Image (cartoon, coloured by chain):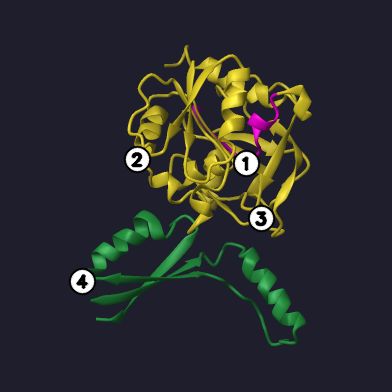
Amino acid sequence: MALVRVAVTLKPSLLDSQGRTVAGALEKMGYAELESVRIGKLIELRLETYDEARVKEMCDRLLANPVIEDYRIEEIVA
Amino acid sequence: MRVAVLRFPGSNCDQDALFAVRSMGFDGAYVWHEETNLDGFDGVFLPGGFSYGDYLRCGAMASRAPIMAEVRRFAEEGRPVIGACNGFQVLCEARLLPGALLLNAGEKFLCHNVRLRAENRDSMWTRGVDREIRVPIAHGEGRYVADSETLARLEGDGRIAFRYVDGSPNGSLNDIAGILNGAGNVLGMMPHPERACDAILGSEDGRLVLEGFSRVAATV
């Protein structure tokens, strides 16, 4: 069994309006040192066997949209 | 003209779309997303709503549904395909249209009438839009984005179908409300023409857009 994490993030050039709203709330709560917040998705996949090429394919075909997002694959449990 | 109104789990403008299509004098019927052929149909309407609860990304799962292979065939054959609101998001996720739709810049769900201007009157969808039209928007994720190269190509090739007259309410680049594919037979737009097809609804301007379905005979 393998546990794989896929982190999907909005491309840096795109405005993350959700992150901006959360940043505004944190600032109002007194965290003046905050420069920005970006919010992404964390997707955990449990797999019988881990084949990086196949997980990459899952990302390219559904989990991430290359027009707006980047992703990073991390194997947690081999 | 027989129009297929697609239904995904979570579509909620499907009834409006079929009502509008029929009120225009076209024949129409619902088609479930798991169907695999559109034989007997001449055009497609991808309605608004929240397909798959907007999970993962708006339109992401719907764009991989079995029926989408047929929508792709219709797009390639030059038949009329329109996606409004979630339907636009599905067409972008299916890569039948470039770019993507993100959370509104102002974070709020927007639900009001907007004024639109047809930028290019050469396509089957925009030919009849000879004046500003007033149609409603109702979306939380309608901010159109594309890389600068794509944007320049859309502008240069006359593929901006509609622009918001009073500035983009959602942060869309270049005030874009709707775009066309290269051949001009696939239209995606965030506003809802199907909700503006009867005087009792406050506007009939959407009919000028949906008349596009009648312009297919000459091109297919």
Residue that mark 4 sits on = A49
Q: CA distance from mark 2 to mark 1?
A: 24 Å
Do dots 1 and 4 share one subunit? Answer: no
Q: CA distance from mark 1 to mark 3?
A: 12 Å
- Residue B40 magenta-drawn? no
**Colour yellow maps to chain:** B
Residue positioned 38% across, 43% down in the render = B65
Chain letter for the residue marked with disc 3 in the picture: B
Which residues fall within the magenta stretch?
Answer: B184-197
Which mark's residue is nearer the viewer, 2 or 1?
Answer: 2
Which mark's residue is nearer the viewer, 1 or 4?
Answer: 4
Residue that mark 2 sits on = B66
Query: Split into 4 quadrants, where in the image is the C terminus of chain B?
Result: top left
The amino acid on which the numbered mark 4 sits, given as a three-letter code, is Thr
**Colour green maps to chain:** A
Q: Quadrant of residue B165?
A: top right
Residue that mark 3 sits on = B104
Residue that mark 1 sits on = B190
Q: Are marks 4 and 3 in contact (CB under 8 Å)?
A: no
Q: CA distance from mark 1 to mark 4?
A: 42 Å
Residue positioned 44% across, 23% down in the render = B79
> Can you tell which mark lies on residue B220?
none
Residue at the limit of the structure toward the top, as seen here: B218
